Image (cartoon, helix red, strand yellow):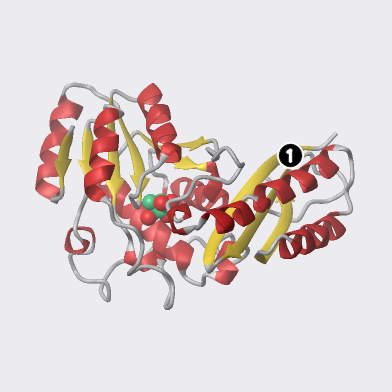
């Protein structure tokens, strides 16, 4: 594996691969890698000859007062992990490489509508930061395939919409949520938890499963199920932000005939914001 941090080095390597006819996959990350990222790399390897993983803690997707400064930066460990996964190229740019005109002058891209609700409502501007940096990564790497995780379900839908709208020739693949033995979805932020906090955090998946089971049994009282889940999360010691039952295709409100649903939630434990979701097929 080679580690590259500049645009010219990246382009040189990529053009050699393209000349050889290789298909290139990109796995965009913010580092502090865990088994969830490793599973995305394995999916990327199934679809492409060459796998690029980017590690970049993107400042434009963090709001004021969020954890940009304290976000775990573990590049050496990440490189070791990626080497073990036989990744071809680790792209670890500085801010000036990603935003050469500076953050104030940076070009932004925004997907309207879908980015304003659920996680977007609680984190105004967050998804604009995500689409803007992902578009930059797509422009720099020009991947044939890009792999994102289902844990960030709203994010991948927004990215798909950007790809469709702008006519980008990138195939977006979705990797399943990888969980700790307790059911807690793996996340770069889980490392901040004490043992007690970690078991409180595990209640998020338990509660989502309760809702998913009710839905799968035919319960369509969506608002009541959401309210019940909020109560169960609070009783478990969490500070839930939202629990929402939506149509999985576009996150629209479900109706009496909706078949493919998703239960999504965001909740805080010890100041750490967790997100999780479960896809449900209605009977
Ligand atoms: O999901 C993430 O880790 C980030 O939002 C992403 C896609 C790498 C963009 O910074």
Residue at image point 73% right, 65% down: 234
Give me the residue at 27% from left, 51% from top: 74
The residue at which mark 1 appears reads as 280
From the viewer's perspective, is residue 242 above or below residue 78? below
| Residue 262 x/y as whole percent | 70, 46
Identify which residue is drawn at 73% across, 50% down.
207
Residue 102 position (above or below residue 217) = below
Tell me where residue 76 appears, x and y as whole percent.
Answer: 21, 46
Give the percent coordinates (x, y) of residue 254. 78, 51
| Left or right of 2 in this view: 149 | right
The reply, left or right, for residue 78 in relation to residue 64 is left
Report which quarter residue 113 is drawn in: bottom right
64 relative to 265 in the view: left or right: left
Q: Secondary structure at mark 1?
A: strand
Residue 113 is at least partly visible in this image? no
Q: Which quadrant would residue 24 be assigned to in this image?
A: top left
Q: Nearer the viewer, residue 280 or 274?
A: 274
**Relative height, residue 181 to residue 267 (above, below):** above
Left or right, residue 180 beside residue 92: right
Quarter occupied by the N terminus: top left
Whether residue 276 appears in this view of the structure is yes
């Amino acid at each position: 594996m080679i580690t590259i941090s500049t645009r010219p080095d990246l382009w040189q390597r990529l053009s050699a691969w393209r000349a050889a006819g290789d298909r290139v996959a990109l796995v965009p990350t913010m580092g502090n890698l865990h088994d969830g990222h490793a599973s995305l790399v394995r999916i990327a390897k199934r679809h492409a000859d060459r796998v690029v993983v980017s590690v970049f803690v993107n400042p434009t997707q963090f709001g004021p007062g969020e954890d940009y400064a304290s976000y775990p930066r573990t590049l050496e460990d990440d490189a070791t992990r990626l080497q073990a996964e036989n990744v071809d190229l680790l792209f670890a740019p500085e801010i000036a490489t990603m935003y050469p005109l500076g953050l104030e002058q940076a070009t932004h891209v925004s997907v309207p509508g879908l980015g304003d609700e659920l996680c977007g409502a609680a984190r105004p501007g967050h998804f604009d930061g995500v689409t803007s940096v992902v578009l930059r990564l797509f422009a720099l790497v020009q991947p044939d395939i890009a792999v994102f995780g289902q844990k960030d379900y709203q994010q991948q839908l927004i990215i798909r919409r950007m790809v469709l709208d702008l006519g980008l020739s990138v195939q977006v693949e979705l990797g399943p949520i990888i969980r700790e033995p307790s059911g807690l979805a793996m996340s770069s932020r889980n490392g901040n938890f004490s043992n007690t906090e970690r078991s409180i955090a595990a209640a998020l998946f338990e509660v989502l499963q309760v809702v998913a089971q009710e839905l799968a049994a035919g319960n369509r009282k969506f608002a009541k199920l959401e309210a019940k889940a909020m109560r169960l999360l609070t009783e478990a010691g969490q500070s839930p932000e939202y629990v929402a039952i939506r149509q999985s295709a576009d996150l629209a409100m479900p109706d009496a005939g909706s078949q493919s649903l998703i239960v999504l939630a965001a909740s805080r434990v010890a100041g750490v914001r967790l997100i999780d979701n479960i896809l449900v097929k209605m009977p």
